Amino acid sequence: MKSWSGVNASTHMGHMMDGMLSDSQIQQLQDSEGATFDRLFLEGMIAHHEGAITMAQDVIDSDNKEVAGLAAAIIEAQEKEIALMKDLLKRY
């Protein structure tokens, strides 16, 4: 990842991945509470996890076995967490 052009850790590694909350979405989350906060948080995290899966799929076929293994582990873990969050979201 360090070799990607434009890398800057202070700006999410130099790019906006799918699923990153916009400034207005972050503000909406900050301004909410209770069930509304819970729903917005879950919706945002689901999108964020889906973005992580998309990024991992980009390197799943890497010749570097460690990178490919990490990508597979990320996909598996994020899919499980998405399923859990979608189940929790049914409450709202």
Image (cartoon, rainbow, N blue to C red):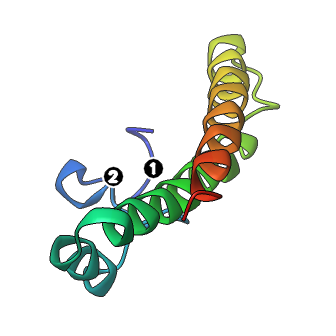
Crowding around mark 2 (Cα neighbors within 10 Å: few <14, some 14 to 19, many 20+) is some
> Where 26 sits versus 75, above or below?
below
Residue at x 75%, y 43% (from the top left corner): 57
* Residue 15 point in image, percent of width and height: 40, 64
> Where 49 sits versus 78, above or below?
below
Which residue position is annotated with label 2?
13
Secondary structure at badge 2 equals loop
Residue at x 23%, y 48% (from the top left corner): 9
Residue at x 47%, y 54% (from the top left corner): 45
* Residue 5 point in image, percent of width and height: 41, 57
N-terminal of the two: label 2 or label 1?
A: 1
Amino acid at pointer 1: Trp
Asked if the residues shown at circle 2 and circle 1 are in contact, with their CB atoms under 8 angstroms apart, the answer is yes
Asked if residue 51 lies left or right of residue 30, the reply is right
Instruction: Report the residue that reaches farthest toward the right.
Output: 61
* Residue 85 point in image, percent of width and height: 58, 46
> Where 88 sits versus 31, above or below?
above
Q: Quadrant of residue 84?
A: top right
Q: Quadrant of residue 80?
A: top right
Which residue position is annotated with label 1?
4
Q: Quadrant of residue 75?
A: top right
Secondary structure at badge 1 equals loop
Amino acid at pointer 2: Met
Asked if residue 25 lies left or right of residue 65, the reply is left
